[in-house]
Image: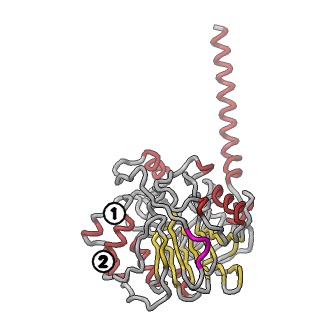
Amino acid sequence: MRFLRRVLRWTGILLLWTFVAACLATVIVPRYLDRIYYAGPQSGHYDGERFFNPDGEDTVRPPTGGNRAGFFWRFLRRDDTRPAWPAAVTVVKGTPPARVIGGAMRATWVGHATVLVQADGLNILTDPIWSDVAGPFNLAGPRRIAAPGIDFDKLPKIDIVVVSHNHYDHLDIPTLRRLWERDKPAIVTSLGNDTILRSAGVEARGIDWGQRVALRPGVDVIVNRNHHWGSRWFTDRNRALWSSFVIKLPSGNVFFAGDTGAGDYKWANEAASYGPIRLAILPIGAFRFEEGQMSTGSHIGPADAIKLWNRMGRPTALPMHWGTFRLSWEGYWTPPRLLRALQACAGETSGRFAPQSLGRPWDIPQIGQAPPPVDDERVDACLKTPAVTALR
């Protein structure tokens, strides 16, 4: 009896302290996980505490609607009605040259949103990630399906890195630290993300939409608006800004969309206002979180990508943000197949916006006469055709 009373007593003490710890955690942990990455004057996209999309905020609710608890529960139990993905895909890896000069431009899709662009003697990387897992501490999160198209040790010396926002599949601390320690590149990002990088020992320039960093005569990196959101934890939402980029080069401008929804589409026109675009790097994947969905507030699908490409003057374009990490519901090959089906239906036959293989170098042609525009209404009509709706 005495033993039972002792057990009950200690059990009661343990429960009491567990309750106290839980109460303290609800107060302390959110403040600990919330980070102030940037402080500055209010603007048309910053309220003094958090950034927001000035063209309408449609990125707060889960992409399936409903509530976040239900969305995360579906994600955790991995609803098996999703199309199957391969456990791994074969990648023929490339070995890029040390430099590309003489007005030539070469692009190699490394995987996800990571692209190596070589032009004017410069080597440029977009949202570099070589980690196997896109998540906190590289432990929790989507696992890489496709190996990087270039081994890290085969990368030439990198001169410029652009980082679009702070999600783990785009701001990968281990990769950025390796690049900084090896090459000391100029790293340009949007407001607040430089704080995250600096805390990891990586120097970066964080600037606002519409601002630029002049790196050498004729070479500027411009931070351009797009439509997304940012967070590293559960409570630091939108403490840092998201962006696209225009990289002005003597041989022609490069546009990198980062991770984005369509928003008002006007940010694509803003990118084109800096001069003709020779290469546009546009996302086409992670757009479907339930059957039949064609885009979300945070991610464009192929249809919106075509509309954005239209507004940029229909340059040579490389589709990315698909086929590396499983982030959504659609099948592995659905983004490029859907892009081709929409182009065929809409009569877009120029071949300027075409899927590329991982690791395959692609010589980007000089800026030439743009092909005819594709009407938005025609693209919308094509979304209802059997060849498109059959793709899961």
Q: Amino acid at mark 1?
A: Gly
- Residue 189 visible in image: no
Residue for badge 2:
344
At x 57% / y 83%, what residue is drawn?
A: 253
Which percent across, then down, holds residue 140?
Answer: 56, 47
Which percent across, then down, holds residue 330?
Answer: 38, 59
- Residue 95 visible in image: yes
Q: Is residue 85 magenta?
A: no
Colour convention:
secondary structure
Residue 292 marker: 1
Q: Is residue 99 magenta?
A: yes
Label 2 sits on a secondary structure element that is helix
Q: CA distance from mark 1 to mark 2?
A: 20 Å
At x 38% / y 89%, what residue is drawn?
A: 372
* Main SS of residues in magenta: loop
Q: Quadrant of the C terminus?
A: bottom left
Q: Amino acid at mark 2?
A: Ala
Q: Dot 1: within a 10 Å radius of its alpha carbon, few (fewer than 14), some, or many (20 or more) residues?
A: some
> Residues in magenta?
96-100
At x 38% / y 48%, what residue is drawn?
A: 79
Vertical placement of residue 319 versus 171, above or below: below
Q: Is residue 135 left or right of residue 194?
A: left
